[in-house]
Image (cartoon, rainbow, N blue to C red):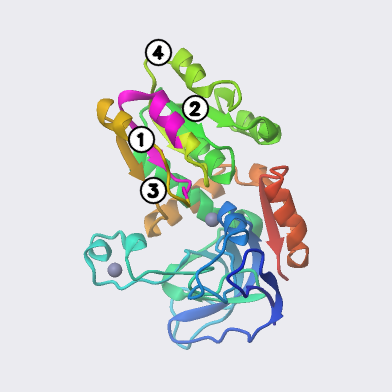
Amino acid sequence: MKALVRFGTKPETLEFQEVPKPLVDETHAILRVEAVGICGRDLEHFREELDDKKVPFIPGHEFSGTIVELPPGAKNFKIGDRVTAETIDFVCGECEVCDLGNYNLCKKRKNIGGGMNGAYAPFMKVPLEYIHLLPDNVSFEEGAMVEPACVSYNATLINSNPKEGELVVIIGVGTVGLLCLQMATLRGAKVALIGLPEDVNRMKIGKDLGADYLIYANENPVEKVLELTKQNGAPLVIDTVGGSSKTMDQALEMVRPGGQITKVGWFMKTTNTTLDTLIRKNIRLQGSFSHTHEMWKECIDLISSGKVNAKKMISKVLPLEDWREGFELGFSRKALKVILKPN
Ligand SMILES: [Zn+2]
Ligand SMILES: [Zn+2]
């Protein structure tokens, strides 16, 4: 089969290559990939130099598909089932975090679309243990949105847990930012979104999805948040921006003393952020990473019931061959979520 392969360590070494079709085994099913989302992380990776232990691999970790092969005796699933799956290929199941049910944080974890081949391909292999059925009313495209929804669910509702009526500031209006917005409004929180001037379209979608305030990053967002909160600061700031530490500095300035900051966007380099503000303001700073089984179930329900609108966030659906166009749309920030269809 022809798949999109990250073949080299140098940036932009991604191309279609002929690779063997994955084989079914005792613990894995084969999916025909129906939809795969371009993640901000895929874009960042594309322009990054990678460690030579990491390549070659097929990227793509936000996907849905149809089960086309199952090992003999597989329970719970049948050929033809419409599914999505978690991004885990392996965790040890024996360490303390695995024991506590936080298997997403296992040190021995192997990722789909990273350490293991992902969904930028017509077929892929997924562990039976991490497959979830899609309800009939959830399209394959929406099915590919479950993964980022889970990232946002974990960051907003599990790790941060805002209260009804509380102001939540979300920095960054990409897919995860706008899904964090939707999670926060589920809780009855008020939301201020901070985006770049070139994010006008994304901000508009944010408004439609229930944002109470739109703040542009070039208009002194710290001051704006202080104004909104009578100079108190926001009880919760969720920073979804990757590749910059500026937003973290702003979060420290705009958070209320005793408040919390949740960091979802990766810094990806060393930062000059001074953390003394963290101490002086008695702030709880936390990272939020990945998701677990229960969150997948919850997010599939939220999308199926229409409480979370995944459809509105999909700007473009393209055949996998046109991945360059999709990546360009992502880099230019003209699109929100671009979905690729390998088949
Ligand atoms: Zn992702
Ligand atoms: Zn483990």
Whether label 4 touches label 2, CB < 8 Å: no
Q: Nearer the viewer, residue 231 or 24?
A: 231
Numbered-mark total? 4
Q: Nearer the viewer, residue 263 or 22?
A: 263
**Residue 157 seen by the camera:** yes
What amino acid is at disc 1? Thr
Q: Earlier in the sequence, mark 2 or mark 3?
A: 2
The residue identified by callout 4 is: 231
What amino acid is at disc 3? Ser
The residue identified by callout 2 is: 191
The residue identified by callout 3 is: 288
Q: CA distance from mark 3 to mark 4?
A: 27 Å
Q: CA distance from mark 3 to mark 1?
A: 20 Å
The residue identified by callout 1 is: 274
What amino acid is at disc 2? Val
**Residue 186 seen by the camera:** no
Whether label 3 touches label 1, CB < 8 Å: no
In the rendered view, tell whether residue 21 sits above or below residue 321: below
Q: Which of the 4 image quarters holds residue 23?
A: bottom right
Q: Which residues are magenta?
A: 248-267
